[in-house]
Amino acid sequence: QVQLVESGGGLVQPGGSLRLSCAAYGSIFRVYDMGWYRQAPGKQRELVAGITFGGSTNYADSVKGRFTISIDNAINPVYLQMHSLKPEDTAVYYCNANVVGGSGLRNMYWGQGTQVTVSS
C-alpha cells in the first residue's frame, strides 16, 4: 500500500512563510505527478499546485508568485513553499499522488491533510 503523510502546517501571521512536506511510503515504482490541494471549511477542495516527475509545474492563479512546489525524486517527498501568506490561504492542505504502487497499477492517493491557519 502507498501512504502519504503531510507535515509542516501550523499557525502563521499574514505575510509569513511555511513549508509543507509530503512523504510517500510503501512500494512506489513510478511517479506520474504529485500535487497539493486545499479545502477551507464550507468550501470545495481546490488544486493549489501540481508537479510531474519531469518537473513541469502548474499553480492556481491565487498562489502564483507566492507558492512553489518541488519534489525530491531520491526520497519521494514533495514540498510546498509558501510565502506572503494571506488569511484566505487558511485551509487544510492535502498531498495528492498519481503513482504506480505495489499493486502494479496506477492509482491516485491522498494524505490525511495538514492545517494551515493564517491569522493575526
Image (cartoon, grey):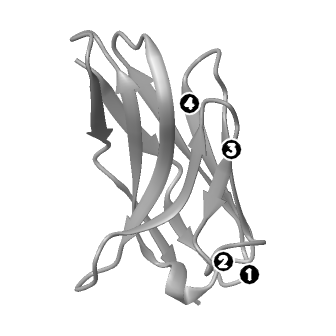
Could you say where residue 77 lies in the image, as x and y percent from the top left?
Answer: 56, 30
- The residue wearing badge 4 is 77
Could you say where residue 88 lies in the image, as x and y percent from the top left?
Answer: 51, 87
Q: Residues within 10 Å of mark 4 (few under 14, many from 20)?
A: some
Q: Nearer the viewer, mark 3 or mark 1?
A: 3
Q: Residues within 10 Å of mark 1 (few under 14, many from 20)?
A: few
How far apart marks 3 and 1 lie (CA) works out to: 27 Å
Dots 2 and 3: beta carbons under 8 Å? no
Dots 1 and 2: beta carbons under 8 Å? yes
Upstream in sequence: badge 1 or badge 2:
1
Amino acid type shown at disc 3: Ser
Upstream in sequence: badge 4 or badge 1:
1
Q: Residue at 66% x, 51% y: name it.
A: 57
Q: Residue at 40% x, 37% y: name it.
A: 97
Q: What mark, if any, has residue 56 been given in the picture?
A: 3
Quadrant of res 65? bottom right
Q: Nearer the viewer, mark 2 or mark 3?
A: 3
Q: Nearer the viewer, residue 60 or 79?
A: 60
Q: Quadrant of the N terminus?
A: top left
Whether residue 54 appears in this view of the structure is: yes
SS category of the residue bearing label 3: loop
Q: Quadrant of the C terminus?
A: bottom right
SS category of the residue bearing label 4: strand
How far apart marks 2 and 3 lie (CA) works out to: 24 Å
Could you say where residue 12 lies in the image, as x and y percent from the top left?
Answer: 60, 73
- The residue wearing badge 2 is 85
Q: Residues within 10 Å of mark 2 (few under 14, many from 20)?
A: many
Query: In this rendering, would 93 be left or right of 69?
Result: left
